[in-house]
Every structure is written in structure tokens, then in C-alpha cells.
Amino acid sequence: MSSESVLGNNRIITLDVIRGLAILGIFLVNMPSFTGSEYMVYEGIDKTIRMLFDMFIQTKFYTIFSFLFGLGFYIFMTRAEARGEKVFFLFSRRLLVLLLFGILHLVFLWRGDILHSYAIIGFFLLFFYRRKAKTVLIWGLVLILSFQFLTGASALLTYIGEQLDPSLNVSESIRAETLAEGAKKTEAYTTLSYPELLEWRIPNELKELIWNIPFSIPDILGMFLLGLYAGKINLFRRVKELKRKLRITQIITLFISIPPLIAIVWGYSQHEEVTFMYNLGNYFFLHFSGFTLSIFYIVTVALMLEKQTWQRVLNPFRYVGQMALTNYLAQTFFGVIVFYGFGLYGQVSLTEGFLYSIAFYCVQIIYSYFWLKNFQFGPFEWLWRLMTYGKMQKFKKETS
């Protein structure tokens, strides 16, 4: 296997491996919300795990997924265009189907759904498909850096305000509000029946999420555009050719990531016991390192897959990545059943939730491997294609 190898209808294995790793990272990020441990006070090993999550996982992998979404947009459009399809109409229909999945996921299962945001923001990609690669790159970087600047400026101004007037103490106010919200949510998830919980979630969870979508556009669309740029320059089929530039990118993004990571460690060192650190400073460090480390991770995996040893080590992740939508939804479905359905919500520590996530993901690797031996797509990938094209799609693989 090489980074240029393809599967089925011209799949690029490197992308499936990165997507599979991203699904694991997203699962670890989402797990505290599934279990209710996101509102716990962390100490001991839980505090260390939470700090490591913030340093290396939180905001890093949904950012990678955003990059892959933009790249997937380019692959979808170019292949559909080569077949003579009406590509703008077809991709719009694809987004509407994804929006339907996202709304159902958001309303009936979990507030942390990302699909509805991707579907809505994905329409902006249509304005960039015909643009030059350099133009797309510039727009992507401007959007991302603007988001980082505004986040950093807000954090800095808040810090200055607190120093000038200690009575403001915005961070402590956010912490108190978060703990109150957590107590309210834990009570709902541990006392309400499922129909009652659905009714409770609409005013208490869903309204705020919908309101926040516009604020996430620069961050998510910026990474969409970097993925689109990677598609336009055919990055993942030119890894050997671009190895020197990729090495430079790898070193620069790692170097830039070090200061915010140190800041996160320093923040945790100031408290013996911590909640998930809801303050504007930590929010900035999380998101800034999320951008730089996500690029570092993508480039590193692409370079690693040039070596056969790493190909063998990372190969299992591609099975999960090849049916990423199915596995993403399965993580939520079983998370709701296990932790809400069996009354475990708020009873599981961060460490226990972490071990559950690793074990469940291993099951997903095995399941995905055997599923893909018999089928072309995961079940939800197949359904997505069926609803996008409006005609039956080949599902089972031909056997010799």
C-alpha cells in the first residue's frame, strides 16, 4: 500500500486513514458529553487526562474533519463533472440530505452534532469551486486567522479588564454558569423519560446551538477552503514530490503550537482541582493550537504513510475512515443507550469514559473491516448516496 493507492472507485487510502484517526479524536472529545463527565471537577488522573485532551485532541480533530470535508467536496464535484452531472445541483442535494441526517441526530440523540453545521456552511463552498487554488488558499487563511484574532483579542481584553477591575472576574462567572448548567443538565438526563428529555432539550440545548452557527462560520469554512485547496493542487497524490515543503510545514506548525500548549499546561497548574476550563484565554489557546496541530497531524500522517512500517501500523484506521458517517452516528447511538439508557449518565469518570471510547473504537475497526469485505459502503454512506442521486446504488461487492 502507498499513499497513492486507491480503493473501490478511486479512494485515496491516506484520506481514509486520516479520516479514521479523526473519528477516534472526535469520539474522545464527545465522550465527556455522552457520559456527563464534562461538568465534573477533575482531580488526579482525570485532571491529567483532561489536560492532555485539551493539549492534543480538543478542537484538533473536528478541524481535521472540516479540512477533509472541503477536500471531499472537490473530489465529489470533479468526479460528478467528469460524468456530465449538474454538479452544483447535485452537491446542494447532497448537503440537504446531510442536513436531514444532522437535524435528526441533533434532535433525537445529541446536542453535539456537527453534521447540520457542515451542511449549512457547506453551501458557501459552491462560491469557491471555480476559483483559482491560490485564491482559495488566501480566503481560507484570512477566515481562520480572523477567527483566531477575534478570539485572542476578546481573551486579552477580558484579561486586561479583570486586572483593572478585579470585581469583573469574567472567568469565574463563566465557571459558575457552566457548573449551574451542568447540574441542570445532569438532573434532566438522570430523571426525565426519553419523551420528556426531548421536550426539555429544545429550549435548553437546541436554541443556543442554532444561534451559535453564524459564529462558527469563519473557523469551519476556513478549514473547508484549505481542504479544497489541497484538492485543487492534488496534494495527497503528490506527497513524494512535495515532501520538502511538507516537512517545512510540519516543522513550522509544530513550532507554532508549542506556546499555546505551554499556556494550557500553565493554566492547569494553577488549580489543584479543575472543571473543563471554560474561560476565554483557554478557549483561545485551544482553538489556536487546534488549527496549527491539525495541520501538523495531517502532514505527519501523509509523510508517515510513505513508509511501509507505518502503512501496516495505521492501516486499520482506514476501515473506520471509509465508513466515517456510519461510525460517527454509531458512537452517538450507543453512547446514548449505554449512558442515558442504563442510567450511567453522570456516574462515569473521565478515565472510565476514555477506556470505554478506546474499547468501542476497537470494536468499530473490527466491524468496519468485516462490513467492507462484503459491501461497497457503510450503511449510512449508501443511504446518503441513494438520497443524493435519487436512484439505487450498488451496495454489495461482487464475489469471485
Image (tube, rainbow, N blue to C red):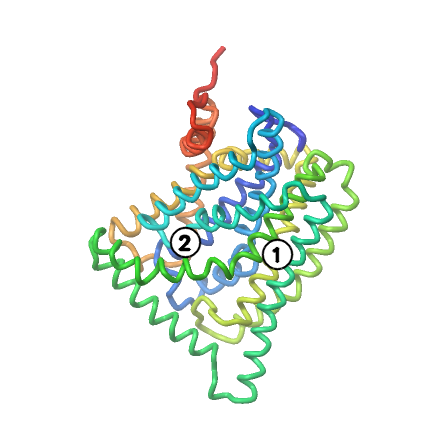
Q: Quadrant location of residue 256?
A: bottom right
Tell me what residue is drawn at x 34 percent, y 57 percent.
348
Compared with 275, 95 (above or below) is: above
Sequence-wise first label, 1 or 2: 2
Q: Residue 73: horizontal and vertical position, in percent? A: 57, 39
Taking depth in this image into account, of 89 and 243 the one nearest to the observer is 89
**In the picture provided, is 126 more to the left or to the right than 331?**
right
Amino acid type indicated by mark 2 = Gly
Compared with 191, 88 (above or below) is: above
Compared with 183, 303 (above or below) is: above
Q: Residue 222: horizontal and vertical position, in percent? A: 61, 53
**In the picture provided, is 170 more to the left or to the right than 314?**
left
Taking depth in this image into account, of 195 and 182 the one nearest to the observer is 195
Q: Residue 244: horizontal and vertical position, in percent? A: 79, 44
In whole angstroms, how far apart are the C-alphas of marks 1 and 2? Answer: 20 Å
Taking depth in this image into account, of 81 and 171 the one nearest to the observer is 81
Dot 1 falls on a residue whose secondary structure is: helix
Amino acid type indicated by mark 1 = Phe
Q: Residue 318: horizontal and vertical position, in percent? A: 54, 34
Dot 2 falls on a residue whose secondary structure is: loop
For the image, the number of numbered tags is 2
Determine which residue is flagged by label 1: 291
User: Label 2 crowding class (10 Å Cα cut-off): few <14, some 14-19, many 20+?
Assistant: some
Tell me what residue is drawn at x 50 percent, y 39 percent.
92
Determine which residue is flagged by label 2: 112
Quarter of the image with the N terminus in it: top right
Tell me what residue is drawn at x 45 percent, y 39 percent.
325
**In the picture provided, is 379 more to the left or to the right than 12?**
left
